[in-house]
């Protein structure tokens, strides 16, 4: 499945949501999001594509492939956009971006959940 790179994600966000924030800010936000995705979605699955995530920083190669497939790239756009709007105190735009982020996150999570078995077991009594 096609993936999006760090530079592609940043360029896409800048095209869709012009802003004054630095590349380093956006890398930090992408790192934060991919860490969340790794910890909450990928980590406890059978045969995960990656077994650890160290994050990104300003030294990370722009061709580094992000965790979420291209099909769900909007998750990156709206995560950064919500952070931009929050930082700019544009709360209406923040709320809209947050709702879009949540929708794409849930869509990605559902897809991942359907296609990757969990290693966790749940015990319940009847």
Image (spheres, helix red, strand yellow):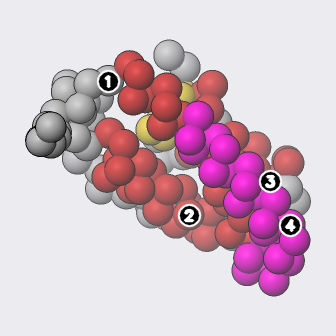
Q: Are marks 4 and 1 in contact (CB under 8 Å)?
A: no
Name which residue lies at 31% across and 52% down.
Answer: 39
Question: Can I make out residue 107 in this image?
Answer: yes
Element type where label 3 sits in the image: helix
Span colored in magenta: 85-107
Quote the CA–CA distance across marks 2 and 1: 26 Å
| Residue that numbered label 4 is attached to | 93
User: Extreme front residue here?
Assistant: 126
Please give the label number shown on residue 14: 3
Sequence order check, earlier mark of 2 and 3 = 3
Q: Nearer the viewer, mark 2 or mark 3?
A: 2
Element type where label 2 sits in the image: helix
Please give the label number shown on residue 29: 2
Quote the CA–CA distance across marks 4 and 1: 34 Å
| Residue that numbered label 1 is attached to | 116
Q: Position of residue 101 (x, y in %)?
A: 67, 51
Q: Nearer the viewer, mark 2 or mark 4?
A: 4
Quote the CA–CA distance across marks 4 and 3: 16 Å
Sequence order check, earlier mark of 4 and 3 = 3
- Tell me the quadrant of the picture where the C terminus can be found: top left
Q: Are marks 2 and 3 in contact (CB under 8 Å)?
A: no
In this image, 117 relative to 24: left or right? left
User: Extreme bottom residue here?
Assistant: 89
Q: Residues within 10 Å of mark 4 (few under 14, many from 20)?
A: some
Q: Residues within 10 Å of mark 2 (few under 14, many from 20)?
A: many
Sequence order check, earlier mark of 3 and 1 = 3
Quote the CA–CA distance across marks 2 and 3: 14 Å
Sequence order check, earlier mark of 2 and 1 = 2
Name which residue lies at 85% across and 56% down.
Answer: 17
Q: Position of residue 47 (x, y in %)?
A: 20, 25
Q: Nearer the viewer, residue 17 or 123?
A: 123
């Amino acid at each position: 499945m096609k993936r999006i790179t760090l530079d592609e994600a940043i360029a896409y966000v800048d095209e869709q949501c012009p802003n004054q924030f630095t590349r380093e800010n956006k890398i930090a936000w992408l790192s934060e999001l991919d860490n969340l995705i790794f910890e909450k979605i990928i980590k406890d699955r059978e045969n995960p594509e990656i077994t650890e995530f160290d994050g990104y920083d300003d030294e990370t190669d722009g061709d580094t492939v992000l965790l979420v497939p291209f099909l769900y790239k909007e998750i990156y756009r709206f995560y950064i956009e919500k952070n931009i709007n929050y930082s700019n105190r544009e709360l209406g735009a923040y709320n809209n971006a947050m709702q879009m982020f949540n929708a794409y996150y849930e869509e990605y999570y559902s897809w991942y959940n359907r296609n990757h078995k969990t290693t966790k077991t749940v015990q319940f009594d009847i």
